[in-house]
Amino acid sequence: MNFVFISPHFPSHYVNFADRLHNMGVNVFGIADCPYEELAPQLKNSLTEYYRVNSLENYDEVMRAVAFFIHKYGRIDVLESFNEYWLEQDAKLRTDFNIPGTKYPEVLESKRKYLMKSHFKKAGVPAARCHCVTTREEGAKFVAEVGYPVFVKPDIGVGAYASYKINNEEEFNAFYDNYPSVPYVMEEFVNGLIVTFDGVTNAENEPIFMTSHIFPQNVAETVNQGDELFYYSVKKIDPKLEKAGRAVVAAFNTTARFYHFEFFKLYEDKKGLGKKGDYVALEVNMRPPGGCMPELMNYEHDTDVYQLYADMIVHNKLYQPTEKKYVGIYVSRKNCFNYAHSHEEICEKYGYNLMTDVDVDAIFSAVMGDHMYLMRADTAEQAEEIRNFVLEKC
């Protein structure tokens, strides 16, 4: 089996995908703009061959790299980057070389916030009404229909970047007076808890591994207010969420890949969307959950999601544990705050729960914090206790 891995060095823990595939006898071919000598030793050992390009942004260069591997090794069975930024390019490469998987322009249906809506409708899962931002006049018509507040975000974007709530006419006019250079969408505001439906599908587009995480604070609010990021997993997926998640999987082409879906769980009844406690589709991502969530998933299940993925690719079945054993916790700190408890006190009090802690790369710190802890607890109550201790201010 031949597997092309785009940008296998970033983020650093993605080397585990290459390692597990290589250990199963897969030819893993890396393409990136990083000098070979700067690759991690584990990654070097996992790659059958590496092709360095001057820039991954240069499609012709990347296309020539894929053509080189095909000429030398034969047909490519899988091409992935696992990275939101490169998903569109991945799809174009699959199209040009007839590699199985999501093609272009189909990929835009899971990249563009506006185009996702038709698939949610197909799935029978409600979603917020949405308007592609054009003129101020059209925006005013949309606001007149749904009322304030509304939420604006890039039509293609990730990590709640440049996304925020518009509460009144003054903020509405300020948005249009300083309209961004990228396409935006405007949605009716949904008051709900963000809950994820994450997992892996097989070759028949069926979820064979499923998990779920809760974000008590909206990620956009976390970024815009400069707060620390905290989220945790649930031991058992709500059957209503699983039903909605499976329906969305079926409505998209998620065949043989990781997926990361986000839903609102309504805090209150919302006309046209549902009753309190119902799930409303927010967005889909056809990749592993971002940041260190794959690592957290390992700790929650006492499993290896990288091996789980490799087993699915090679054998279309799982051999890894999938039962949720713990409540996984991600909690971060920011350097701008003074905390009541030191790092040493955290380790002393919750050393049994602490799986790992590291400084966050500056490129991710606005969302993920400056220093993050991956922990696990026996209950949601203990997870909240840990959060309160870690984030208590002086």
Image (tube, rainbow, N blue to C red):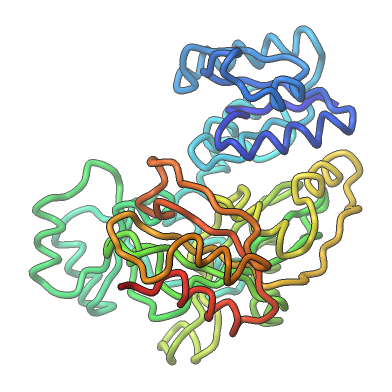
Q: Tell me residue 58's x, y (percent).
A: 46, 17
The mark tally for this picture is: 0
Quarter of the image containing the C terminus?
Answer: bottom left
Q: Nearer the viewer, residue 240 or 40?
A: 40
Could you tell me which residue is drawn at 12 percent across and 50 percent down?
178
Which of the 4 image quarters holds residue 129? bottom left
269 relative to 188 in the view: left or right: right
Could you tell me which residue is drawn at 62 percent across and 29 percent down?
8
Q: Nearer the viewer, residue 220 or 313?
A: 220
Q: Tell me residue 151's x, y (percent).
A: 30, 67
Could you tell me which residue is drawn at 74 percent across and 34 percent down?
100
Q: Tell me residue 38's x, y (percent).
A: 56, 18
Tell me if I can see residue 103 in this picture: yes
Tell me if I can see residue 243 in this picture: no
Which of the 4 image quarters holds residue 352? bottom right
Which of the 4 image quarters holds residue 97? top right
Q: Nearer the viewer, residue 385 or 208?
A: 385
291 relative to 19 in the view: left or right: left
Quarter of the image containing the N terminus?
Answer: top right
Could you tell me which residue is drawn at 61 percent across and 26 percent down?
93
Q: Tell me residue 25's x, y (percent).
A: 89, 28
Q: Nearer the viewer, residue 31 or 61?
A: 31
Residue 84 against residue 339 in the figure, above or below: above
112 relative to 294 in the view: left or right: left
Residue 39 against residue 89 in the figure, above or below: above
